[in-house]
Image (cartoon, rainbow, N blue to C red):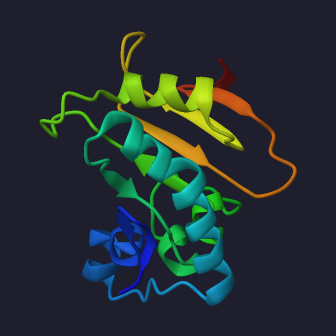
Amino acid sequence: MPNLSPHLTLAEATASDTAKRLGIDNTPPPEHVANLMALANAIFEPLRLHFDAPIHVSSGYRSKALNAATPGSSTTSQHSLGQALDLDQDGKGTGVTNRMVFDYIRANLPFDQLIWEFGDDANPDWVHVSYRKQKRRGQVLRAFRTEPKYRPL
């Protein structure tokens, strides 16, 4: 499979245990591959270069069928457009934490949406980041397991 950027392959951005287990095709159409490529070059690659360490994608592209089979996913998820990645550095042995990833994106990169996913005040469980070429919201949120689920950060 082709690379989306020097350090991110299409296979990494589309990998899904849920899709494998349920036999769901998670192959993105060309327009979603183009979105993944833009995301990889605007967000993923700068992170990889800044930290000089592998960046772990815990969830990337989700076809509509896969998104519907993913608990807690919204029908309007940017994952289904190839515009979002969930990143999880904790326990990967790189010396880079989810908090470091969140803070770097917030201060330096042109994101559409950045979400501190659960965790505590010191570190999120993972970081959700989305990117689109135009009309970026620059929205920063924190996810909670109680209502309201998302609150501005």
- Identify the residue shown where x is 52% and y is 60%: 40
Residue visible at 47% across and 51% down in the picture: 44
Determine whether 79 is above or below 46 in the image. below
Quarter of the figure with the C terminus: top right
Residue 26 vs 97, above or below: the answer is below
Q: Quarter holding the N terminus? A: bottom left
Whether residue 148 appears in this view of the structure is no
Seen from the viewer's position, the closer of residues 151 and 43 is 43
* 144 or 93, nearer to the observer: 93
Residue at the top extreme of this rendering: 121
Q: Residue furthest left?
A: 93
Of 153 and 96, which appears nearest the observer?
96
Q: Residue at 47% x, 87% y: name it.
A: 27
Indicate left or right for 75 with 7 as reference: right
Q: Position of residue 49 (x, y in %)?
A: 39, 43
**In this rendering, position of residue 70 left or right of residue 16:** right
Q: Is residue 9 visible?
A: yes
Q: Is residue 23 left or right of residue 107?
A: left
The quarter of the displayed image where residue 105 is located: top right
Up/down of 21 relative to 109, above or below: below
Which corner quadrant of the image does residue 143 belong to?
A: top right
Residue 2 pos. (x, y %): 40, 84
| Residue lying at 49% horizontally and 54% vertically, measured from the top left | 85
Q: Position of residue 32 (x, y in %)?
A: 63, 77
Residue 87 percent coordinates (x, y): 39, 45
Query: Is residue 79 toward the left or the right of residue 96 in the image?
Result: right
